[in-house]
Amino acid sequence: METFKVDDYNKAFFEEMKHLGCSLDVEGREFAIPDNKKPNFSEVKNFYFGEAKNLTPFQKKFKTYLESNLPYDIIIKKTDKGMFLVDENDLIDKKDLISLLGKIGAKVTRTMNKKRHLLNTEGCVGKLK
């Protein structure tokens, strides 16, 4: 079993790790990752601790739109799989997020570990002001 040492508390990361079934050793400050969850863990780790991909001009505009219409404690990051949104403190319901995105033609493609939402922005190209 692999372990991953954590130095700081990150609520969203900890919740995803818990959802994956990883156990936290509080004294050693490390998560134990089951062998069958290593690929999932790798994706979670890369999202929270890896470098973000550069946003296109449209994606920057889209990010600004989301930041102005959602609570302040959101994370929007682009990875190899696309743009993700994380509501760190669960201040917006998923149905409200879907409704907001629907107004501009965007949608949630997939929700990972009940925390990260993969966004599809194809339908909102040209609809943002």
Image: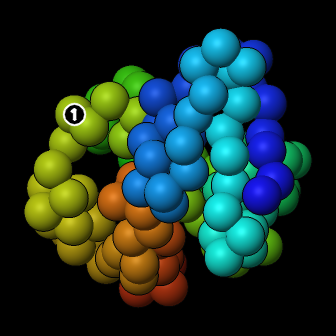
Disc 1 residue crowd, few under 14, some 14–19, many 20+, Cα 10 Å: few
Residue of label 1: 91
What amino acid is labelled 1 in the image?
Leu
Quarter of the picture containing the C terminus is bottom left
Is 97 left or right of 12, judged from the image as shown? Answer: left
Q: Quadrant of residue 37?
A: bottom right
Q: Is residue 51 above or below residue 100?
A: above
Tell me what residue is drawn at x 54 percent, y 43 percent.
23
Q: Position of residue 13 (x, y in %)?
A: 56, 40
Q: Position of residue 83 (x, y in %)?
A: 60, 65
Q: In the image, 55: left or right of 92? A: right
Relative height, residue 66 to residue 125 (above, below): above
Secondary-structure class at tag 1: loop
Using the image, determine if residue 128 lies above or below residue 82. above
Q: Position of residue 100 (x, y in %)?
A: 21, 59
Q: Residue at x 66, y 39 (%)?
A: 31
Q: Nearer the viewer, residue 85 or 114?
A: 114
Question: Would residue 126 be found to the left or right of residue 61 on screen?
Answer: left
- Name the foreground residue: 43 vs 120: 43
Residue 120 vs residue 40, the one in the foreground: 40
Residue beneath the point at 26% across and 37% down: 90
**Colouring scheme, one of rainbow, by chain, secondary structure, one colour:** rainbow
Query: With respect to residue 48, does 78 lie above or below?
Result: below
Task: Judge whether residue 58 can be spotted in this image.
Answer: no
Residue 28 appears in view: yes
